[in-house]
Structures are given as C-alpha cells and as structure tokens.
C-alpha cells in the first residue's frame, strides 16, 4: 500500500512542480505578498499629512505647533491662511487633519480664565484612521497641558492615567498582522493545491485512469492530501522564519505549540480543499469553490478586523472557521508565549473540523468513484 | 464586421447561459461578498469588556468605575484583586484592566495627580489604540464631572474641540462598504474574463476561432461586451445594497458612480483578458487572477489600511492597483459628494490603466497558431 501511495505522491509532485508556471504560482506570489503586505497592512499612523491654521502669532501657539510637527504620526504639508482653504484641503484629501488655533489662543491661555481652544478638523471618511489621528492629537494636547501646568505652577488634574499595553508595548500593528499573514498564506496555498488536484484530473480525463489502477479510494485520498500537507508546512515555516528574521516580530513562545497548530490547521484545510475538489467537475468550478471558501474564511477570522466587533450571529458562525483558531494560536505563541496547555481550547476545534472535513471528503470521493 | 461581432457576442451569451458559473460570478458573488464583508468587517469597538479593580472602595473610586459601567463603549466587570483580573486578561475575557490603588482617594485630594493604572491587551494593536482613546475620553469626562461636583473649575490650559467632517458618527461601515464595492468588483471583473480566453485555449476552440475570418479585435470585443454588461449589473446591485441595506449615505450622484464604475470595470476586465492571454490555462489564469486582484485590492487600495502610512516604496506600488483609484472615488462620492478634485484625477488614472491593459491584450493576443 505504501509503495502505491509513494508512487502517487511522486506523480502529484511532478504535476505540481514540473510546469514552470504552476511552480511559480506556488513560490513567487506568497513571497511577494509576505513582503508587500507585511509593510502595507498597518493601522499605525505614520507621517499622516496635516495642515496648520494658526491665527494667533504667539510663542505659545508656535510651541504647540512644534509639538504637532514633532509627533512621528504627523507631517505638516501645508499652512492655511484663510478660512476658505479649509474645505478644499479636506475635500481633496490633501490633509487628514487640520489644527486650527484661533486668534484668542494665547490670550486665553495666559489669562487662565477659560480654557484656550484648539480646534481639530478631521476627514472622517476613513473613520478608523480619523479616530486614531484624533487620539494622537489628544495625546499631544495632554502633554502640552501637563507641561504648561508644571511651568506655570497651575494645579495638576486630580487623577492621571498610566496606560501600559501588554504583549505589544509599542502597539505596533505589524506584530499583529504579520503572524496573521502566516495563517492567511498557508490557507491560500494549501486550499489551491488540494482543491484543484482532483478537478484537474477529472477535466483531463486522467481520473478514470487513476481509478483503474490498483489504488484504493483511501490511498488516492492520502496521495492527494500529503502534497498539500508538505507544501503547506514548508510555506508556513518559511513565512514564520521571515516574520522573525525580517520583520522582527518577537517569537516569545516555543516551536512545539506552533507546529501542533500548523499540522492540525493544514489537516482541516486539506479536508476542505479535497471536499471542494471532489464536488467540482472542472477546474473553474474548483477555483470558484476555493475562492468561496477562502474569502469568508479570511474575513471571518479576525485577521484584519476583530471578531468581537461582528454581530453576535456572525460571531457564532466564525466558530466553524479553522483560520480563526489558527490565528489565535499564531498570535498567542508569537506575542504572548502561550503553551500547549493554554492552547488546548484552540486545538480541539481544529481536530474536530479536520475529522469532519476529511471524512466528508472521503465519502464524497467514494461516491464519485462508483 | 458588425455581423461577426454580433455573432461572437451571441455565442458568448449562449455559453454564459449554458454554464451559469459566469452568472453566479457576476450576481451571486457580489451579494454574497457584500453581505459577508458588510457584516463581518467592522472596526467599531463597542461594549468592550474591561476589568475594574478597586483596591479600596471609596465614593470617588465608585464614581470613577461607574463612569465605565455607564459608557456605551465599555462593559465594566469588577474583579476582587489584580491577580484575577490579569488571568481574565490573559484568557481574553477582558480587553483591559483599570485599577485604582488603595491610596487613590488620598492622592486625589492631595494635589498630586492620583495615578490610575491601565493595562491594555496589546496583541491587536489597532483595537488597543481605540480602547486607549475611549478610556482617555471617559477619564476626561469624569475629571470635569468631578471638578464640577466639588464646585471648582477643572484647570485645563488648552481644550480640544473636534470637528469631524463627512462621517461625523465615525461609523466604520460607511467607509468600508463603498470601498468593498471596489474590492469585490476588481475580483469579479478579472475572474469573469480571466477564465474565458484560457478556456478557449484549453478546449481547443481558440484554434477554431483563429481560422475564421474574425479579427483579433473582434474576438476581444466579443469577450468584453458581454462580460462588461454582466459586471455593471453586479456593480449596480452592489450600490443598491450599500444604500438600501447598509444605509450608507450617497451624497454624490449615481451617474458619477456609474461613469467611473464603467472605467473601473474596463480596467478589471482588461486585466483579466491580459492574464488569460498570458496564461493559456485555466489553472494558472485563475490563480493569478485571485492573487493579483483580491488580496492587493483588499490590502493596498486604502480600503482598510491607510495608504499615507505605508512606507514610500509600498505607496509607489499602490499606484499600480486599480482599486486604489476607485476606492478613493467611491468613498468620496458616497460620503462627501461630487468633489471633482478627487474624482477627475482618479478617473483619469483609471482611463490610462484601461488603455494600457487593452493595448497589452491586443498586442499579446494570439494571431496565428504556433
């Protein structure tokens, strides 16, 4: 039996790797995507264009503007002199944010009778970016206030916040996104490899030839699953390696809980890929099926947006998504150093999903054959 | 020539009718994807569970913790001590801990700025930053409330006034759903055409087409027109869903959307044609279509990640992504109205891309058998 599976394996790998284009599809895009997305997918604000509208020529207002200029999140790209310029700057997305300091700023500030007002005008089209930019602006003002109060012996606010972030002290979203890319690309490559394998044979008529060989359905299933497993594992290992070496994401935990997660995840995904494969008659259908699985799996995984923000019904639906568990494992091991015991709650759903999908695939296989 | 073109278009429609997978791509897929993304992707954190630890219960500490319990942003959960709260943070039951130490009360009245310890789970950096902003907002409000109760004005040298334009409720769905239309239509446009030319090659019907008197231009137009009509149908459906189902305000005009949508659809279809001409095989064509359309449109179009914050080389790459231009147009036309300063340059960019893709398709299109 193992000899026959081995022979099928060789054939499968030849199929996948002998054609230059399909070899490239397996190797090129994942590497390219890792680099591009690793850098592009960030929620951190960095050098966001802002404008300053200063109607109060004073040392105080210049001091405040210097603080905005000094913040790495912002980059001053224009000066506004007239009120009418505000609308065109925001409308045309020249700037995300305008700091408007009114005429009475220094007078109010020095008299200390009433708070001096600083107006922040924001482009709210992208509400997330707007909120984060507002947070940065708030921090700049809070620091200015504290400094001012200290210098002028004013009473400090009765309470202050000391905020610390665990696991990711500088709140770098790359630390969150790059381990996610490991899951994302492993998913895509594994599904594509397995989903198209049977469909291609069927379209080319070679599936019938496979059937007349002494291979049993189980053996064919194993022979089709193992290439996906090997390629998925290699791909995941490579991306994790790059995450640590290139993107400098800390790997706090150990390798073992990570690889248990990878094997279980790849198994669950192979089952899904083979199910799609045995349902599809043509490669086009196989591809469509793969796609119809990959997109929801990515969206409902917590990769880009948190699961907690989804409506409750959709949240329940994410429970059948293997990527959801795998992302928690990846981020948990990478950033928090979770151990095998702590991840047990993520492993067993993957096992169950894997068992169900593989046996479904096996059943569909057999049904297709006789 | 017209006769031949009409014949080709008829043939294409017959094929569409026979294999309904193209119809599914054009109409079922946008509905499915919009529903999925519209409900699955949200960046609005509401009812965030936070742990409250009061080392010593005093009226002031109580009043501070109730500020969190009565906020829309938080669900306050009390913990008896820090150890329990940390455990809850590690197991993701809560996203942040807010702790008032036993000397909070004394420091509060001592003019020494009582420190409030805040620990945020930083794994998801973006959510952590939003939560930190909400906590600062709640703290700020409580400070004014506290000062008011004591009959003193809060000493605050500078006060921030925020004005948010366009999407003043900062509802993330308002910017995500219009952006999604671009992401989805990139994919659908490319998939529609990517597979059709490759299919002709694989089935050998391309050879038959070449021997007929039709010219290359007619073959390409014959592919383009039917799928353009299908694609625009899908786009109209998506716009209708955005407005009626997701309640995104459409401030600009529908005509601008449809006109720029046409340009965009031509780019997407042209890209699909080029891919399928180059690939000549459905497997590779489909793979490439998914890889070069969906993920880049998702990550590099500014649909969810801010382009200005990406590193400059990546920002340069985003100029190659057609979805980038359409996302900018969609977000502006939906949320800000017909702002020509945004619409015209982006539409011109789309036009240039469309011309390049069609020139490429014409140039690379097969004229003779090898």
Image: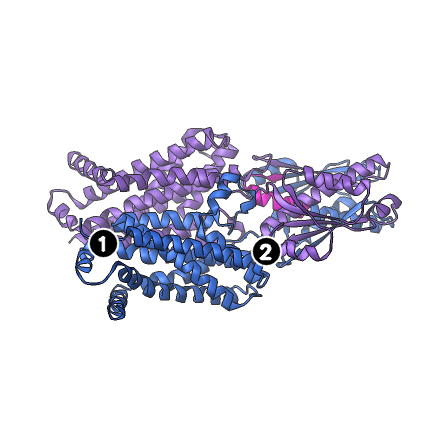
The residue to which callout 2 is attached is: A125
The answer to whether one can see residue B131 in this image is: no
Chain in blue, by letter, is: B
Label 1 SS: loop
Say whether residue B123 is magenta: yes
Secondary structure found at label 2: loop
Tag on residue A274? none
Q: Residue A241, position in %: x, y?
A: 42, 30
Residue A134 seen in render = yes
Task: Please provide percent x and percent y for residue A294.
Answer: 38, 50
Q: Is residue B277 magenta?
A: no
Q: Mark 1 points at which residue?
A: B367
> Which portion, as a residue range, is magenta?
B120-135
* Subunit ID for the residue under disc 1: B
Q: Foreground mark, 2 or 1? A: 1
Query: Number of callouts in the render?
Result: 2
Image quadrant assignment for residue B54:
top right
Q: Nearer the viewer, residue A159 or A303?
A: A303
- The colour with which the image depicts chain A is purple
Mark 2 belongs to chain: A
Q: Position of residue B221 (x, y in %)?
A: 31, 62
Q: In which quarter of the image is the C terminus of chain A?
A: bottom left
**Crowdedness near tag 2: few (<14), some (14–19) or many (≥20) residues, C-alpha within 10 Å:** many
Up-down relation of residue A361 to residue B244 (above or below): above
Image spot of residue A84 (x, y percent): 71, 58
């Amino acid at each position: 039996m193992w000899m026959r599976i081995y022979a099928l394996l060789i054939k499968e790998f030849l199929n996948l790797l002998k054609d230059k284009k399909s070899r490239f599809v397996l190797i090129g895009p994942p590497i390219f995507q890792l680099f591009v997305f690793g850098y592009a997918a960030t929620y951190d604000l960095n050098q966001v264009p802002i404008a300053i509208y200063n109607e109060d020529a004073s040392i105080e207002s210049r001091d405040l503007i210097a603080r905005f200029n000094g913040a790495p999140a912002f980059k001053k790209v224009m000066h506004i002199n007239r009120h009418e310029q505000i609308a065109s700057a925001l409308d045309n997305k020249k700037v995300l944010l305008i700091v408007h300091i009114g005429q009475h700023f220094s007078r109010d500030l020095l008299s200390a009778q009433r708070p001096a007002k600083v107006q922040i005008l924001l482009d709210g089209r992208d509400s997330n970016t707007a909120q984060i930019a507002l947070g940065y602006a708030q921090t700049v003002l809070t620091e200015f206030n504290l400094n001012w109060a200290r210098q002028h012996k004013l009473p400090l606010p009765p309470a202050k916040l000391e905020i610390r972030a665990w696991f990711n002290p500088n709140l770098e979203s790359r630390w969150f996104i790059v381990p996610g890319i490991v899951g994302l690309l492993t998913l895509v490559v594994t599904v594509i490899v397995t989903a198209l394998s049977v469909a291609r044979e069927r379209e080319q008529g070679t599936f019938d030839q496979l059937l007349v060989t002494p291979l049993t359905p189980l053996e064919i299933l194993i022979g089709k699953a193992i290439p996906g497993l090997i390629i998925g594992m290699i791909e995941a290992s490579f991306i994790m390696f790059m995450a640590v070496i290139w993107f400098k994401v800390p790997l706090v935990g150990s390798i073992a809980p990570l690889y248990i997660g990878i094997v279980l995840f790849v198994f669950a995904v192979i089952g899904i890929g083979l199910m799609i494969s045995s349902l599809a008659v043509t490669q086009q259908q196989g591809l469509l099926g793969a796609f119809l699985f990959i997109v929801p799996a990515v969206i409902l995984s917590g990769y880009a947006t948190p699961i907690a923000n989804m409506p409750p019904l959709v949240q329940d639906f994410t429970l059948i998504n293997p990527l959801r568990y795998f992302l928690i494992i990846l981020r948990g091991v990478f950033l928090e150093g979770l151990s095998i015991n702590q991840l047990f709650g993520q492993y067993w759903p993957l096992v169950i999903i894997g068992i169900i999908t593989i046996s479904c695939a096996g059943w569909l296989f057999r049904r297709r054959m006789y | 020539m017209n006769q031949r073109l009409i014949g080709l278009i008829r043939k294409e429609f017959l094929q569409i009718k026979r294999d309904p997978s193209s119809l599914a791509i054009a109409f079922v897929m946008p509905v499915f994807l919009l529903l999925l993304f519209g409900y699955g992707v949200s960046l609005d954190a509401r009812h965030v569970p936070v742990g409250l630890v009061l080392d010593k219960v005093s009226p002031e500490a109580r009043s501070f913790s109730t500020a969190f319990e009565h906020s829309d942003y938080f669900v306050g959960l009390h913990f008896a001590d820090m150890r329990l709260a940390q455990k809850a943070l590690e197991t993701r039951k809560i996203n942040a801990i807010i702790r008032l130490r036993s000397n909070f009360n004394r420091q509060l009245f001592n003019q020494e700025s009582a420190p409030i310890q805040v620990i945020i789970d930083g794994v998801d950096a973006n959510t952590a930053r939003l939560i930190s902003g909400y906590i600062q907002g709640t703290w700020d409000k409580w400070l004014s409330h506290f000062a008011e109760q004591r009959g003193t004005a809060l000493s605050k040298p500078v006060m921030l006034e925020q004005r948010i334009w366009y999407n003043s409720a900062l509802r993330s769905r308002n910017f995500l759903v219009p952006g999604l239309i671009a992401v989805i239509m990139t994919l659908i446009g490319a998939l529609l055409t990517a597979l059709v030319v490759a299919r002709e090659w694989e089935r050998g019907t391309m050879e038959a087409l070449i021997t007929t008197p039709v010219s290359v231009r007619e073959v390409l137009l014959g592919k383009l027109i039917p799928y353009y009509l299908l694609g625009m149908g899908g786009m109209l459906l998506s716009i209708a869903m955005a407005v009626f189902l997701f309640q995104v305000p459409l401030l600009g005009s529908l005509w601008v959307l449809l006109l720029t949508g046409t340009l965009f659809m031509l780019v997407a279809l042209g890209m699909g044609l080029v891919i399928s001409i180059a690939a000549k095989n459905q497997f590779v064509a489909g793979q490439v279509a998914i890889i070069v359309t969906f993920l880049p449109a998702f990550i590099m179009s500014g649909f969810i990640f801010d382009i200005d914050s990406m590193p400059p080389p990546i920002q340069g790459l985003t100029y190659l992504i057609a979805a980038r231009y359409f996302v900018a147009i969609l977000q502006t036309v939906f949320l800000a109205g017909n702002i020509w300063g945004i619409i015209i340059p982006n539409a011109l960019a789309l036009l240039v891309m469309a011309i390049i893709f069609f020139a490429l398709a014409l140039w690379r299109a097969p004229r003779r058998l090898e």
